[in-house]
Image (tube, rainbow, N blue to C red):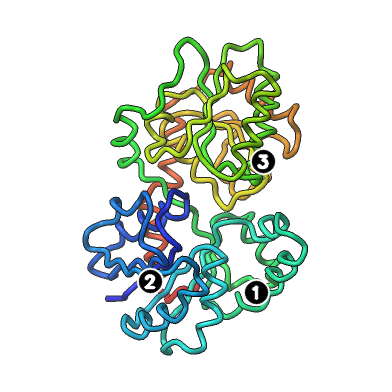
Amino acid sequence: MRTVACILPDLRGGGAERVIVRLLNALDRKRFRPVLILIEKNGDYLDEVASDVEIVDLKRSRMLTALPALFSVMRRLRPDIVLATHGYVSLPLALLMPFLPRGIRFIAREANTPSRWSALQPPLRRRIFSFLYRHLFRRFNGIVAQSDTMRRDMLSFCRLPEERITVIHNPVDIAAIDRQSALPSAVALPEGVKRIIAVGRLHPQKQYPMLIEAFSRLNDIPAHLTILGDGPDKETILENILERRLAARVHLAGFIKNPYAVMRRADLLVLPSAFEGFPNALIEANACGIPAVVFHDIGGASEIIIEGVNGHLAQQGSIDDLAAKMRAALIGDWDRERIRASAYDRFGLPRIVAQWEDYFSSGGTD
């Protein structure tokens, strides 16, 4: 039996955190012993971790300050495989690797497209991260990209050999989503209008001002927009809403632990991000039977959206095209069961977990 230790900052609301929890919960216990190492043990998803998953709390607030504690844990556990998610976890871990017991296979799972995430940083930090990615990621035995788009980006940005990077898409747990979507919704969506939702942190990466501008051009369609999420861009977004006199038609609902009960009652999900790793919100919305509109060249979008079947792809940066695709989606006739099937057949939890198990069995290499 192989011990698989996954490292996360915490279990606050986020797509990567939910993916790792689902993966550890679903691993075959006859083959793998799951361990979850948290820099700080807190977050909304703690109660979703299976009771037989060992949780190790490093009791720190940052990865760099947690390295001594992580060193001690690694020497005690001596896991066969260590999976790190997020660059700000993987890069410090790479610094520690030469001092850890031999025989451990280290895997980095990227949560975002590195070059585009780096582009959002100030110039000095951007140069530092570029240097670290190109030099430290070579220490990992394997790297998992969530989409072909991310894989291509990492090949060029990190200058890694092709055989080092494997694509494993994120899973969608249809059964869990069905259970949670049937619960009462924490957000009351209005009646008698088309219900549009957006899900994700209020962060510049998500480009919510573009969504609000596109939505303002749909005045001839009775529609309402609800944004689920919280973050540093909240005040900017509120200003955008007020400037366009949309306070009655746009609602910032904050972070919602169970977004599926909202998704199930919606008509359309819109994801206006500048970039993503592999947008969980898309496959989760599809699992709830609703179509999505998303910019075509963000990571994984073109691998999820089948044009006219489960959504539409808009031209990146074009508010006109985003508004046009939203309009087409709102007046379109969608087959909800076909949309659900498009998610399950390609990204169902059993299929994706089997890919991870094969990958772990190979030691984290192809």
In 3D space, how far apart are the residues under numbered discs 3 and 1 (Cα atoms)?
A: 27 Å
Compare residues 305 and 158 and report the one nearer the observer. 158
Mark 3 is surrounded, within 10 Å at the Cα level, by few (under 14), some (14 to 19) or many (20 or more) other residues, namely some
- Which numbered circle lies on residue 58? 2
Q: Residue at 61% across / 78% down in the picture?
A: 138
Q: Which residue is mark 1?
A: 161
Q: Where is 283 relative to 51, above or below? A: above
Residue 1 position within the rendered picture, expressed as x and y whole percent measured from the top left:
27, 76
* Labels 2, 3: front one: 2
- The amino acid pointed to by label 2 is Leu
Residue at coordinates 31% horizontally, 36% vertically from top-left? 180
Q: Is residue 178 left or right of residue 155?
A: left
Residue 315, placed above or below residue 11: above
The one nearer the camera, 88 or 22, is: 88
Label whose residue precedes the other's in the sequence (1 or 2): 2
Where disc 2 sits, the SS reads loop
| Amino acid type indicated by mark 1 | Pro
Q: Is residue 57 left or right of residue 166?
A: left
Badge 1 element: loop
Residue assigned mark 3: 296
Residue shown at the point (38%, 71%) measured from the top left? 58
Q: CA distance from mark 1 to mark 2?
A: 33 Å
| Whole-percent x, y for residue 88 in the image | 56, 66
Which tag is nearer the camera, tag 1 or tag 2? 2
Left or right: residue 73 compared with residue 124: left
